[in-house]
Structures are given as C-alpha cells and as structure tokens.
Amino acid sequence: MKLLKCTTGQSTSNIKRALLTGVVALGVAGQQAGASCGSAFCTVNTGWNVRGVQTEPGLRFDLQFQYIDQDQPRSGSNKVAVGQIPMDHDEVKTINRNWIASVDYALDDKWGVSVVAPLADRSHTHLDNDQAPPVSESWSFTKLGDVRVLGRRQWRSESLEAQRLDYFGITFGLKLPTGETKVENADGELAERSLQPGTGTTDLLLGAYFQRVLGSGMSWFADVRMQQALNTYENYKPGAQLSLDVGLRHELGDRFSVMLQLNALHKDRDSGSEAEPEDSGGKFLFVSPGLSYAIARNFQIYGFVQLPLYQYVNGVQLTANWAAMAGISARF
C-alpha cells in the first residue's frame, strides 16, 4: 500500500483506491477466550477497522473458520494433569470449530454497522467424580451462538507531506441472546453454562480504535473493547471482559501481506448460582502472526496462528497450546 503524492483534487481518490486494494488483518472481538469447560473463540482481531478502512459506502462480507483444541488443564499460570487437583469433575478436552460470518455496511466514510453471527461446533469431555469409578461424560453439538450488532463512528486525518493517513473511531452495540442455553448430551445431561453456545444475556459492547497507514506499505493499529452483561439469565451472568489488541501489517508486493498482533484479554469471574465463579475468568496474552493474499481487488483470503505468551486462569480450566484460523473477505 502506497500513499501517493498528488494534487489536492486527486489525493483523496488515490488514497481511497490504495486503501481498498485489500487490507486483511485480524477471535471475533470480545468473544469468550476461556472458561471452566473450555468454550472458546480466538481473540485475534477481525474488526472491519483493522481489515480495511471504509472510505466509500458499500457492503462487505467475511467468513472465517477457527480451530481451538483445548486439551491442557491449567491452574493459575501452571499446567496440571487431568485429576491432579481434586474436583467434583475433571475437565479433559474441548475442541472448538467455530464458523463466524460477518456482514458490514458502510453508510459513508464516517458511519457503519456490522452484524457478526458465530456457529459453534463444539465437543467436550470430562470425568464425573461423583461416581466410583469416575464416569466419562461428553457433549457434541453444532449450534448458533450469540449474535453481535455493532455501529461505529469514524474520523480521519491526512498528511500528504508525511505520507500518512490516520483513522480513529468508536464502536458500540449489543451481544444478543440468540444462542441456545439448554444443550444436553445423549443421556439428557445439561452442559455446563460456560459450555453452552449462548449465555442468555444481553451484553453491552463498547470500543475505540486507531489505525495509521504509512506510504511505505506499513500500517499499524490499536483496538480496545469492553463487554458487560446487562442482566442475569436463569441465575447465570458471564464475567465482564476487557481486551486490547495492537498489530502491524506490511505489504510484500501487490497481493501478499504479513501481519503480527498482540492480543490481551482480561475476563472477570462468572456469577450466579448456576455459574462456577471459582473456575472462571482469567488473564491471557497471545501473539498472532498471519498472512493475507488478494485473490482479486475486492477478495482476500487470510490465515493466522495464535500462540499463548501468558495464560492465568482462576481455579482449574482447559486451555489451548495453539489455535488457528482462516477466512475470506469480499467487498461488493
């Protein structure tokens, strides 16, 4: 991506064309990263403000797949073996295969709205220690999760002399209680609330972002987001979340780009009689390298690997040693 020195009348048009040739950077923002049973989404940032700055009205569509194999029990920041710490049940493994569809519409270069719908394909196994010998219990389901609706207000600042464009904005919206909360296994046992595809609550979503685009083919961003449940549903309330992402992007020619992110997440304990506050919430820091390739002017594919730098959980929870995601983005 290059910012071109032009006459005043042509600069904005050329910059728009340059920006829209395909910025793809990076779990669905603000999704749950860890829980007692290990339900999870990648914390890699896939916000539209990161993948490309909307400077013209239009529709964008993004579809991504995430794979997260949580097979490592952890207590605090330490890895533990299954059953090492006595509990009423021992978490063994959770595999998350998430499909996330996003539709974004830019009204103009200032206002936009997006809808994000996750489909959770999840399998989970734990050992019930209330019986002797312990009995293995498992759940496997593919269900719609909680849909998010977000609006944004964006501003821009341009410097032709410095070959630089700055974009900054705010996001605001709701996570809606569209996901099921009563998934059972073949024996009729309800999955734990943290494992369910939906929380049953309506959550407030607030955020702010900054992106700088440089004429050298480099860009960087910072994005902070908050999620807070506005109600309790059937004696369960998920913990509030605060996340911070920073990232770099560098173009390698007209089609390839390399990207790198740091993703930090703090999640409070869940609350309510149906929650497990002693085994929920934590602090996480990940590094996420990735690549993108422009198939055509308005179509890009991308992929990332997410690696943990630090994971601290309350109680005992399942964590992953790595996660991966891939997606395709299109603008119409």
Image (cartoon, rainbow, N blue to C red):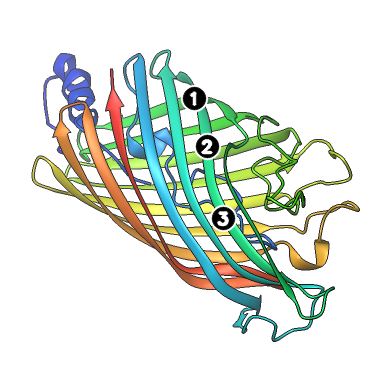
Q: Using the numbered discs, state the Cα–Cα distance from disc 2 to disc 3 in whole angstroms.
A: 16 Å
Q: Using the numbered discs, state the Cα–Cα distance from disc 1 to disc 2 in whole angstroms.
A: 13 Å
The residue indicated by pointer 2 is 118
Dot 2 or dot 3: first in sequence order is 2
How packed is label 1: few (under 14 Cα within 10 Å), some, or many (20 or more)?
A: many
The residue indicated by pointer 3 is 123
Expressed as whole percent of the image width and height from the top left, the position of residue 332 reads 28, 17
Q: Is residue 302 above or below residue 282?
A: above
Looking at the picture, which amino acid does disc 3 mark? Answer: Ser
- Please indicate whether residue 38 sits to the left or right of residue 55 in the image: right
Expressed as whole percent of the image width and height from the top left, the position of residue 204 reads 70, 34
Dot 3 or dot 1: first in sequence order is 1
- Please indicate whether residue 96 sits to the left or right of residue 177 in the image: left
The structure residue drawn at horizontal position 82% and vertical position 55%, both measured from the top left corner, is: 275
The structure residue drawn at horizontal position 41% and vertical position 35%, both measured from the top left corner, is: 49
**Res 114 label:** 1
Expressed as whole percent of the image width and height from the top left, the position of residue 277 reads 82, 62
Looking at the picture, which amino acid does disc 2 mark? Answer: Pro
The local secondary structure at tag 2 comes to strand
Q: Using the numbered discs, state the Cα–Cα distance from disc 3 to disc 1 in whole angstroms.
A: 29 Å
The local secondary structure at tag 3 comes to strand
The structure residue drawn at horizontal position 20% and vertical position 38%, both measured from the top left corner, is: 163
